[in-house]
C-alpha cells in the first residue's frame, strides 16, 4: 500500500501556534501549572444576548442547510454594520459568509491565485497566510517590517516588492502577531502605490477591527479609487468572543464573491445555521459588550507592556490593537541554561514553556525569527504571574 501524501499537503507546514498549544496541554495533563499565552482566543464568554439568539434559532428549527453564502438576514446585518460602523457601501450580493475568517481568507486566495502568481505578505505575518498561498500553488513574497518601524511596511518597500506576477497583497490591521495598526494616512500611502498596479487585489484582514486602542478603525476599502480591488475579511470570533461559532465573511467586488461562492459550494457549503443566527444578533444587537472587552484588553496591554519593559534583554514596542505582544528576543540567542542552548526564538519559546511554564510562540513561523509572540487574552492575574515566570526563566540564561 502506498502511504505517501499529496505534494500539495507536503508543501504545508503544521501550525506553530497549535503545536505549542498541544505541548502546553500535554504538560497540563501531567499536572504542570502552565499559563497559556500561545493561542489568540479571547478569554471571555460569548455575550448572553448572542447565546439567547442561538437558543431561539434551535427552537425555531434552524437546523437545515443555509444558502451557500449565508442567510439573507445575516448578510443584510453585515451590510448594515459596514455602512454604519465603517462608512462602506456594499450590497448583500457582495457578502459571503464562511466557516470562520480563516476560510474566508483561504477562499479568496484559492479563487484568485494561479500557479506562479505572487502574493505579497508583510512580515511578521499570521502563520497561515503563506501556507494558504502555497496551497494555491502561488509564491509568497515577504516584506520585512522590523520592530524599529513598528512592524509596518513602507510605501517604498511595497513598490519594490511588486512585480508583473504580483496578484495580491495581504494586509492585516490590527495585526496578528504584532498588534500594530495602520493609520488612515499610512493606508492611503500604500493605496497610492497599489493604484499603479491594476492587477493587484488587496486582501484586508480586519478580524481584530474592534480590538483597537487608536479610536476609529481605518480600512483601506474606505478609499473610493481602490475599493473595487479590496476584499475585506472580518467575522465574529475576536470582537464578540465567538471563536468556536466559526462565522467569518468577505465583503468584496461581486465577481470575487461569485468565485468564492462557487468554491465554497463544492467543499463546505454554507456555515452552521445556528451560528449564523447568533452572528446576526452579534452584528445587529447591542454593542456595549464589545467596548467592555476592548477596554479590558487595553488595560491588559498596558500591563504586559509595562512588565515586559522591565525584563532585561527584551526589546518591546507598544501594540495599538489586537491582544498580542511581540518582543524582540535575539539578545538571548547563544545563551544557555545547563545543557540547553537557545539558538532560535522557537528554542526560547520551548524553554519558557518547559522551564518557566508559560506557553508562548516563537517568531520563526511568523516570519520574524528574532521575536516571539505572547497573547494577553488572559486574566490580569495570569499576566502578572506569567511575566514573573518569564523574567525569572530568562535570568537563568547565561
Image: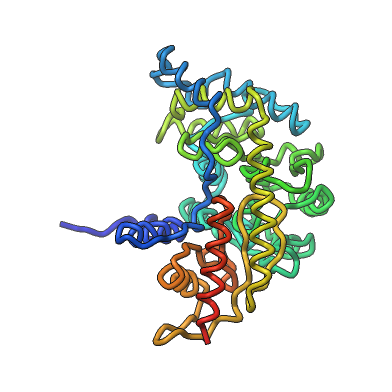
163 or 241: nearer the eye? 241
81 or 10: nearer the eye? 81
377 or 96: nearer the eye? 377
User: On the image, which quarter does residue 152 sit in?
Assistant: bottom right
* Number of marks: 0
Q: Is residue 354 left or right of residue 235?
A: left
On the image, the x and y values in percent for residue 273 come to 45, 23
Q: Is residue 155 left or right of residue 61?
A: right
Residue 67, placed above or below residue 262: above
Question: In the displayed image of the protein, which residue is found farthest to the top?
Answer: 60
Q: How is the image coloured?
A: rainbow
On the image, the x and y values in percent for residue 195 come to 79, 48
Q: Residue at x 48, y 26 (%)?
A: 68
Residue 39 in view, yes or no? yes
Residue 276, placed above or below residue 16: above
Q: Is residue 181 left or right of residue 304?
A: right
On the image, the x and y values in percent for residue 316 come to 68, 68
- The N terminus - image quarter: bottom left
Q: Residue at x 50, y 26 (%)?
A: 51
344 or 240: nearer the eye? 240
Q: Residue at x 50, y 63 (%)?
A: 360
Residue 173 in view, yes or no? no
On the image, the x and y values in percent for residue 53 come to 51, 20
Amino acid at each position: 500500500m502506498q502511504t505517501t501524501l499529496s505534494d500539495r499537503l507536503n508543501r504545508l507546514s503544521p501550525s506553530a501556534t497549535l503545536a505549542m498549544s498541544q505541548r502546553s496541554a500535554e504538560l497540563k495533563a501531567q499536572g504542570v501549572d502552565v499559563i497559556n499565552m500561545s493561542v489568540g482566543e479571547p478569554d471571555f464568554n460569548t455575550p448572553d444576548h448572542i447565546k439567547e439568539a442561538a437558543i431561539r434559532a434551535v427552537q425555531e428549527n434552524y437546523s437545515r442547510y443555509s444558502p451557500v453564502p449565508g442567510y439573507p438576514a445575516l448578510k443584510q446585518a453585515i451590510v448594515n454594520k459596514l455602512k454604519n460602523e465603517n462608512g462602506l457601501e456594499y450590497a448583500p450580493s457582495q457578502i459571503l459568509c464562511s466557516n470562520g475568517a480563516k476560510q474566508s481568507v483561504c477562499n479568496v486566495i484559492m479563487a484568485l491565485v494561479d500557479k506562479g502568481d505572487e502574493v505579497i505578505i508583510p512580515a511578521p505575518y499570521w502563520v497561515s497566510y503563506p501556507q494558504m498561498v502555497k496551497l494555491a500553488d502561488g509564491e509568497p513574497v515577504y516584506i520585512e517590517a522590523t520592530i524599529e518601524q513598528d512592524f509596518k511596511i513602507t510605501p517604498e518597500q511595497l513598490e519594490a516588492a511588486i512585480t508583473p506576477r504580483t496578484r495580491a497583497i495581504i494586509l492585516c490591521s490590527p495585526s496578528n502577531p504584532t498588534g500594530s495598526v495602520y493609520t488612515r494616512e499610512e493606508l492611503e500611502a500604500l493605496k497610492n502605490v497599489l493604484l499603479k498596479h491594476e492587477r493587484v487585489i488587496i486582501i484586508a484582514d480586519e478580524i481584530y477591527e474592534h480590538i483597537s486602542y487608536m479610536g476609529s478603525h481605518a480600512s483601506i476599502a474606505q478609499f473610493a479609487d481602490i475599493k473595487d480591488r479590496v476584499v475585506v475579511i472580518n467575522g465574529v470570533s475576536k470582537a464578540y468572543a465567538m471563536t468556536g461559532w466559526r462565522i467569518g465573511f468577505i465583503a468584496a467586488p461581486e465577481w470575487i464573491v461569485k468565485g468564492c461562492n462557487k468554491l465554497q459550494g463544492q467543499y463546505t457549503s454554507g456555515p452552521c445555521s445556528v451560528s449564523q443566527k447568533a452572528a446576526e444578533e452579534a452584528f445587529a444587537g447591542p454593542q456595549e459588550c464589545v467596548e467592555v472587552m476592548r477596554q479590558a484588553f487595553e488595560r491588559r496591554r498596558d500591563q504586559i507592556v509595562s512588565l515586559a519593559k522591565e525584563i532585561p534583554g527584551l526589546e518591546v514596542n507598544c501594540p495599538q490593537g489586537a491582544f498580542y505582544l511581540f518582543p524582540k528576543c535575539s539578545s538571548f540567542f547563544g545563551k544557555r541554561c545547563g545543557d540547553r542552548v537557545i539558538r532560535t526564538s522557537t528554542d526560547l519559546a520551548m524553554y519558557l514553556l518547559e522551564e518557566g511554564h508559560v506557553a508562548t510562540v516563537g517568531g520563526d513561523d511568523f516570519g520574524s525569527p528574532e521575536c516571539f509572540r505572547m497573547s494577553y487574552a488572559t486574566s490580569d492575574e495570569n499576566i502578572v504571574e506569567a511575566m514573573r515566570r518569564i523574567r525569572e526563566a530568562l535570568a537563568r540564561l547565561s
